[in-house]
Amino acid sequence: MPKADVELAVLSDLVERIFPPAVRCAIEPAAGGVSTPVYRIRRDSEVFYLRLAEDRDSSLAPEMYAHQYLHARGVKVPEVVHFEPFDERLERSIMVTAEIPGEPVGCRVVDEATTEILREAGRDLAAINAMIVQGFGWIRRDGHVSHLQGEHDSHRAFALEDIDEDLALLGQGPLAEAEINLIRDIIDRYGAWLDVEQAWLAHGDFDVSHIYQRDGRYTGIIDFGEIRGADRLYDLAHFNLHDGERLPRAVLPFLLQGYGDRAQLPPDHEQRINLLSLLIGVRALGRSRRRHPPNAYQVYLASAIRRAIAFLKR
């Protein structure tokens, strides 16, 4: 029997143990789940999602902690309905969440309903980014959670991790040597902004694919598999980097309107967001160049990096 079938058989036993047996559940692999396996559970008209940790040494406890903290404060994120630190048969940490109904806002046209969805998402994002993290970078997944702990002591170490190697690689294409020099000049010019004292929770992969809506009404934000401690503007910067990738026009201003309802943005937030966008883009493009041959995503990232450079050169 193939491994996937074995896993589904074990998952079926697990689901029967979690949910009352009176109603039959159907289990199927779900789209997405790049870093961790995700399965959809259908139970009559209800839908749940079962996530497995990436490996036996990684715990979903920090993710569960973040979900519960945010959900208790009224943020529209998936509600955790079951968590196990370690399942012996699957040899993984597991978490089951309720569904955020609908589909991504990136599937819509940009109309009045879409802009209001983005404003509501901005309010929730501000609440997400107000959760304190100890340290910067990827959240440690060692299973012991009284708080969220990043892997770096300083924001500068996180923001500039592998920057020299990335720039050396990207200078061989798709970026020109002059563009690499401009990036170095920008980092020097705005370097003081990297000395951030407090880390805040970042979704880590925030874009229009993770903002959900149903029939033009905002329903919530999904997929916290890449949470990290970061500058409070990190998610806005990630969104800015990908703004226009799926929708035909930039929609960050609408997100910022909602964000500003809950959090005061600094007067120079546009420059700060673009600096972080630039650094996130360099890291993402460098990682993609190491793993994949040239592709359309790399072309997009290079253009987004150039857009950030142009903004910061003003």
Image (cartoon, rainbow, N blue to C red):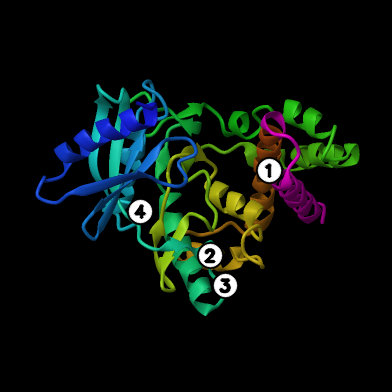
Residue 11: which disc?
none
* Residue sitting at x 42%, y 37%: 133
Image-quadrant location for residue 59: top left
Residue 144 in sight here = no
Kind of residue at disc 4: Val
Q: Would you call the spot at circle 2 few (<14 residues within 10 Å), some (14-19), or many (20 or more)?
A: few
Please provide the residue range marked out in magenta: 289-314
Kind of residue at disc 3: Val
Precedes in sequence: disc 1 or disc 4: 4
Alpha carbons under labels 3 and 4: distance apart: 23 Å
Residue marked by disc 2: 107
Residue marked by disc 4: 77
* Residue sitting at x 66%, y 67%: 248
Q: With 136 as the anchor, is 83 left or right in this view?
A: left
Image-quadrant location for residue 177: top right
Alpha carbons under labels 2 and 1: distance apart: 23 Å
Image-quadrant location for residue 76: bottom left
Alpha carbons under labels 3 and 2: distance apart: 7 Å
* Residue sitting at x 43%, y 35%: 36
Tell me the mark number nearer the camera, choosing from 3 and 1: 3
- Residue lying farthest bottom? 112
Dot 2: element: helix
Dot 1: element: helix
Kind of residue at disc 2: Cys
Residue 109: which disc?
3
Q: Would you call the spot at circle 1 few (<14 residues within 10 Å), some (14-19), or many (20 or more)?
A: many
Residue marked by disc 1: 281
Kind of residue at disc 1: Gly
Q: Is residue 304 magenta?
A: yes
Q: Would you call the spot at circle 4 few (<14 residues within 10 Å), some (14-19), or many (20 or more)?
A: many
